[in-house]
Amino acid sequence: MGRWHYPSRRAQGAGTDSTIFNFGVPDSGKSTGAQRRKVRSCSNGSSFCALLRGKAACITGGTTGIGRAITLEYLPQGANVAVNHLGLDTDETHRKSLLEEAQKLKQQGSSAVPTGDIIELAGDVTDPETGQKLVSEAVRQWGALDVFVAISGIFRAAEFLMLSKQQFDRTMEVNVNGTFYSCQAGAQQMVKQIFHVLRGTFPTSNTSGGEGGAIIGISSIKALVGGGLQTHYTPTKAAVLSMIWVQRLHISPALLL
């Protein structure tokens, strides 16, 4: 049996820093359809390359900002996406417009490069059950989970000397606790899938890969350089950066049991 692979990488740009943790089944030295992800190039110059065809992804905070952008990129690449949002009345326009854009992308797809499906679930990520329900619904729909993107976060500028306990605590709860619970739910499902693959008990009817996955936590360059009016925010992004790195140290031994 070959080595286990637990690579991580960081991609910086536009003020964000995303830490990606990939893990999967052992490398047997043989390239098979079940163990290798096929990356398709775009020979026609189109951005619709089916890079994620048939993969299942969960994205928290997926109706606005970076989460929305990721969702709208994953879909035309063939990924099926389960989107989490807070479910506020004030955000209803964002939810509806996201579904409308997803439908347009669906219409633009083809049999050769089909657009993925989208489902959406409301919930507060500071509640551990929110991430668990999001993952469970994705697995129920598509058979497995391949990617989990934890991006839900909040920021409202505040002076350090005037920062209230309520604002500080809420920022920590959403940006740190919410990211932790979300990533934990995704990791638990992916580890379960790997055990099934190794034991030969993984369902053959699933539409996704199921042989491992990627957990992506969205941090910020502010985690490294700080910023004005952000004494409550930058520590949360430093926590996310550290959190993803450390999570793989705990998951790797579990996979070797």
Image (cartoon, rainbow, N blue to C red):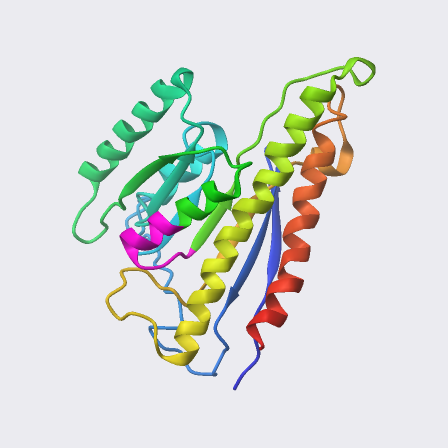
Q: x and y percent of residue 24 in the render?
A: 49, 68
Residue 19 drawn above or below residue 83: below
Q: x and y percent of residue 201 in the render?
A: 34, 76
Residue 59 drawn above or below residue 146: above
Residue 196 drawn above or below residue 116: below
- The number of numbered badges drawn on the structure is 0
Residue occupying the point 67% across, 37% down: 237
For residue 64: magenta?
A: no
Q: x and y percent of residue 156 in the render?
A: 64, 19
Residue occupying the point 59% across, 33% down: 174
Secondary structure that dominates the magenta span:
helix
Q: Which of 179 and 212 is in front in this view?
A: 179
Q: In which quarter of the image is residue 176?
A: top right
* Left or right relative to 149: residue 165: right
Q: Residue furthest right?
A: 161
**Quadrant position of the C terminus in the picture:** bottom right
Write the start and end of the magenta stretch as one range: 136-146
* Left or right relative to 212: residue 93: left
Whether residue 176 is visible here, answered yes or no, is yes
For residue 141: magenta?
A: yes
Residue occupying the point 27% across, 46% down: 116
Q: Quadrant of residue 101?
A: top left
Residue occupying the point 44% across, 42% down: 59
